[in-house]
Each structure stands twice: as C-alpha cells, then as structure tokens.
Image (cartoon, grey):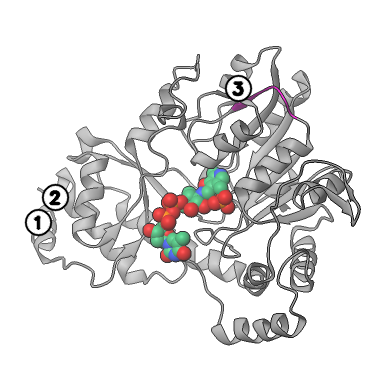
Amino acid sequence: MIQVFRIMANMFKRFPQPIYVTRPFLPPIADYTKGLERVWASAHLTNHGPVLRQFEAALREYLRTENVALFANGTLALQIALRALDIKGDVITTPFTFAATTHALVWNGNRPVFADIEPDFYTLDPAAVEAAITPQTEAILAVHVFGFPCRLDELAAIAGRYKLRLIYDAAHAFGVTVDGQAIGAFGDVSMFSLHATKVFHAIEGGLLMFHDFRLRECLDLLKDFGIASETEVVLPGLNAKMNEFEALMGLLQLDHVPAIIEHRRRFDAIYREQLADVPGLRIPDLPSRNVQYNHAYFPLEIVAGEFGMSRDELVERLQEYNVFARRYFYPLVPDYACYRELETKDPLVVGRRVADRIVCLPIYDSLAPEDAGTIADLIRSFSRGSH
Ligand code: T4K
C-alpha cells in the first residue's frame, strides 16, 4: 500500500485550472437576465426596491419568521445589530473567527474580550465564557464557525443567568437547522453573511434574523441614514442597504439551497472516507443528528509530528498542484497587529493550537467528485505513512 502511494505521488499532475477553497453557486444566466429585464423596466436599482421586498418575503417563508432584515453585507449587519441592541460595554467573543466579527465590535465602540474555544467544533467554550464575565460584560458574541452550531443551551443559560445579550455571528451557517429550527432562531439576533464565498449568497449581503419584532424599526432606520421621513432624520444611521442586483441573485438561489448542500455533503463524504486512516489528520465529526449541517467548509487539523509535515508545508505543497486550501482561521484575531495591545486574560490554549493546525479544503457544489478524490489522494501521498 505504502509503495502504491509513493508511486502515485509521482503520478499526480498539476490541475490545469486552479482549485480554490470555494466557488460561488451561479443560477442559470438566463434566469438572471430575465430578472434584470424587470429591474431595467422599473429603474428601481436600490433603496428597498421590489426585488428586495420579494427576496425578503421569500426568506421569511424559508426561515419561518417575520423577523428578517437584509443588508449590504454581513459586517454592516453585525455592526447595526449591536447598535440596535444598544450594547455599549464589553462583549465576550471568540478569537477563532474572521476579522469582521471583532471589527464589528470595535466599530460599535465595544471592547472585545476573547474567551477560548472548545476543541471539537471550535466554537466558544461556555466555561471560558463564564470565567471571562465581569460587571462590564454586556453581551456574548459567539460564532457558528464553519457552520458548526455553538453550544446553544449552555450559552443561553449563561446569558440568562448574567442578564447578557446573546448574539450569533452565523455568517457561515445559512441552511443549518437544529431540531428542525433555523439556527438563526437562537439568541437575540443572528447574522448570516450572503457573501459570494458562502453556501447561499447574494454577491454581497447580510441577513439578520432577530427574536424581538420591535427591533425591526430601529434596524430599518440604522441601515438607511436614520431617515424616518422626507423631513425627519431621527438617528445617525449608516448606508447599509442591499441593492436590487444582489437581491435578484439571492432570490434566484434560494430554491437551489437544498441541492447545493447535498452536493457539498457528497464532497465532505469523499474527503472523510478517503482521509480517515491517514496518520496525523484530525477531522471534526459531523454535528449530532438533531443538526442538519450545511457543509460550508471542510476543516481539518494537521498534527505535524504524526503527519510528517506542517500545516503550512501542506498548504504550499498543494499549491504546487494548483490547489488553494486556506488557513481559516489563522492567525487568531487577538494576534492581529491591530489587536495585539488588547488585554486578553484567557491564554487561549485551544484556540492557538487549532489556529496553528487548521486548514480548509476546497468544497463547493460545482467541484468535480474525482477532483475531491484526487485532492484526498494527494494529501495522503504527502503523509508520513506513504514514504
Ligand atoms: N463573520 C464571519 C465569521 C465571517 O467569516 C465573515 C466573512 C463575516 C463575519 C463578514 O461577512 P461579510 O461582510 O463578508 O458578508 C472570505 C470572504 O470575503 C468573507 O466574506 C468570509 N467571511 C471569509 C471567511 O472568506 P477571503 O479573504 O478569504 O476571500 P477571498 O477573496 O480570498 O475568496 C476565497 C476564495 O473564494 C478565492 O480564492 C476564490 C473564491 N472566490 C471568491 C470570490 C469573492 C470566487 O471564486 N469568486 C468570488 O467572487 O474572505
């Protein structure tokens, strides 16, 4: 067997086209063109136009709630959520995320307080959250990283006990359900990113799903300059509106979401099966059976000593074959130059270990199954077991 893989390693050819970590789903172009004709006819390009209203209605039905609001992108949606909830103090959050989670806090004037993650699904560790609470803490901002649901019950219990707001960055989690409920139904507010790199996208976009219907008015004002009427501006709002071209892209994708997720599930299964016995790889389990997962990413950890090369070497070797796996999320946010000065009491032991080992393999609906298989074989051929 070892011999077979050594021979194979020499046989692999560089992919003729780059294989990126993701590619956006695109609906049939004829459908988009038809939609564009409608936009042309109305000449209503942005500012709560008819396509956006139709998209919002479709999302309300899909998510089974009246309480949804669309934005220009996920980052602005998150900033606006924090502002609408009037959160002014410290916010406990995860270090293992994309820059935008922390940036949204800082733009809102909140102090981010980093707490460690748990090792199985990389979401905030409830015990670390509880240990980080002080009288200044006002909220928890947790991330369903890679679409893996946070420890919902435990975080809700902590938020309830200490009277904290609970906000979820669900940027990666559109399409995920827990006990049949959309993941956005948990916490005070959840933010989904509808960026082109996401399972479901609107080119750029953000979506808030919220618990208290009274937030709507404030959210609508905050994304539209705080304009209440032609002559009244009631608060210093932003411009965070989604336009008609983006809404059209989102609208045309919604019906495709189950098929997109199903394709991704197949690639997840290929990687999982073909990499299962490779030494030095740690692949997170699939979430438990009450969770319908969206396969947003395929993360795995490289244990260098056992695998035979470091995560960074693996990323470089794959690039030689035109495969662009990504180190989501390395470095940890508190290690960014702009946040190094922030005081972090938690040593973030798990977060640092995971950030040093993590890599996300290409996964998207139009990936060819044989390419996923070849990527898995390539990784196996690099491992110590094959030399
Ligand atoms: N919270 C979390 C936890 C997030 O992950 C994000 C965004 C946010 C908040 C903020 O939401 P938004 O404001 O973005 O709605 C990408 C995305 O730009 C970013 O949205 C995403 N998270 C993050 C995890 O990934 P990069 O810097 O890795 O993107 P980029 O341009 O390198 O794209 C990755 C690959 O995707 C490319 O190698 C090729 C492919 N790609 C990308 C684009 C944009 C395409 O094939 N077509 C495309 O149009 O950040």
Amino acid found under the numbered disc labelled 2 = Ser
Residue at horizontal 78 percent and vertical 35 percent from the top: 85
Residue at horizontal 26 percent and vertical 49 percent from the top: 315
The percent coordinates of residue 13 (x first, y second) are 16, 68
The percent coordinates of residue 141 (x first, y second) are 64, 33
Q: Which residue is mark 3?
A: 129
Q: Residue furthest front?
A: 231
SS at badge 3:
helix
Q: CA distance from mark 1 to mark 3?
A: 47 Å
Which region is colored magenta? 87-92
Of pointers 1 and 3, the one earlier in the residue sequence:
1
Q: Is residue 248 left or right of residue 320?
A: right
Residue at horizontal 28 percent and vertical 48 percent from the top: 277
Instruction: Tell me the tag on residue 6.
Output: 1
Amino acid found under the numbered disc labelled 3 = Val
Task: Using the image as rendered, state which of residue 329 and residue 243 is in the foreground.
Answer: 243
CB atoms at circles 2 and 1 under 8 Å apart?
Answer: yes
Q: Which residue is mark 2?
A: 386
91 is within the stretch colored magenta: yes
